[in-house]
Amino acid sequence: MKSPRFVVFVQIFALGFALLATSNSTASEVIPSDKDKTADGVSWYDIRLLEVEGQGWKETKAPFDRLPATAEKEVRAAVWNLSRHSAGICARFSTSATEISARWTLTSSRLAMPHMAATGVSGLDLYVKHEGKWRWLATGFPREQSNVAKLISGIPRGKREYLLYLPLYNGVSSVEIGLPEKDAMETAPSRGDAKPIVFYGTSITQGGCASRPGMVHTAILGRWLDRPVINLGFSGNGRMEAELARLMAQLDAAVYVIDCLPNINAKDVGSRTEPLIKILRAARPDTPILLVEDRNYTDSFLVTGKRVRNETSQQALRAVFEKLTGDDANLHYLRGGHLLGDDNEGTVDSSHPTDLGFLRQAAAFRVALEPLLKSR
């Protein structure tokens, strides 16, 4: 009988070997994180052994935080707490299995919000690459704080690449993928030197109110553009703060997307935009920056106060852009009036997009981003 010390050594060695394998450019077999099979013959794989995307920093306080541990003392408490939500974080893997399960533990027992489904707040979202395109396959429904779910079964055997998105408005302490014990899991092919698109914004950027994690526009764009994406959306707290600019400047981005107007008024837009750009430019003089106007409230055609809010904020952002663009060829601009369409059907509350709104917003962003990514 092997001693407990020997078993621990073997488990640590296996974890280290699997982590080393994920650093290779080619796919490698992943060793299950839990060698003890469950009664129904499922092997469980910690997603940290896979190609995890959406995190700009490795030195985090918890495994699925979006800001580095050092940021806890640098940013406001509200930003720090929201950064512990796993919005935009996803894992890629390959397998030939005919069924896929998941188990995940959430950091909060609040599974849903009055205007946002539990599947978006606290669920998982599984995509598969089929005939060269990412297609939705299954959603993990969160029924309590700790969940086990069979995501999909009965699919034909064949090696495929998968993408699993984590919750948008909740954190996770652990996420595992389950495969039948006879099947193997491999890391997904590396993206090589592909730089991420870094989004800094508000509750909309974070994903409110997508019905599931894969439907926020940042995730849609990641699939369409075949790029890693880092989502730095902070609900109610995307305020163009210098602390966040300094953190973003640490990231070697393909493009910085600044989309904060829904959280600040025209006065703050006028005073904060230029300093934020200067901080980024000091570290990344050649990286494209895309300034985004706020979407128009969908009831602003009648609600005067909301219409004035949109107009004054947008005017303030354009004024800064026009001031700086003559000296900065890599500063770009996206107008907000068309982001959600023109039929007033794109939101749940005049502000936060539905899936339809996010799809429309992604299409508008794609037109602006594709030219900026050609040389990145």
Image (cartoon, rainbow, N blue to C red):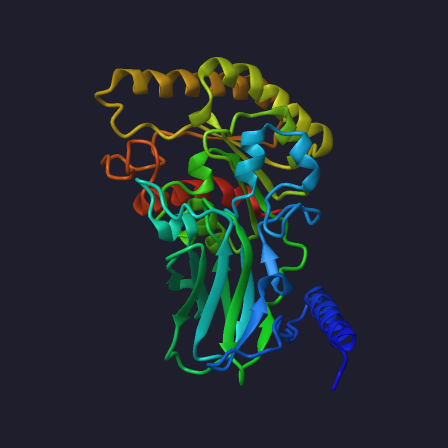
Looking at the image, which residue is at 74% across and 69% down? Answer: 12
Across and down, in percent, residue 14 comes to 72, 73
Extreme residue in the top direction: 267
Across and down, in percent, residue 53 comes to 59, 54
In the rendered image of this protein, does residue 64 appear above or below residue 339?
below
In the rendered image of this protein, does residue 158 appear above or below residue 106?
below
Q: Nearer the viewer, residue 12 or 327?
A: 12
Relative horizontal placement of residue 1, taking residue 321 as reference (left or right): right
The answer to whether residue 24 is seen in the rendering is: yes
Looking at the image, which residue is at 33% across and 48% down? Answer: 117
Q: Nearer the viewer, residue 209 or 306?
A: 209
Looking at the image, which residue is at 74% across and 67% down? Answer: 16
Picture quadrant of residue 83 = top right
Looking at the image, which residue is at 66% across and 74% down? Answer: 28
Q: Quadrant of the N terminus?
A: bottom right
In the rendered image of this protein, does residue 14 appear above or below residue 281?
below
Picture quadrant of residue 47 = bottom right
Across and down, in percent, residue 193 comes to 68, 55
Across and down, in percent, residue 298 comes to 27, 30
Relative horizontal placement of residue 31, taking residue 362 as reference (left or right): right
Please give the count of numbered marks on the rendered protein.
0
The answer to whether residue 249 is seen in the rendering is: no
Q: Nearer the viewer, residue 169 or 22?
A: 169
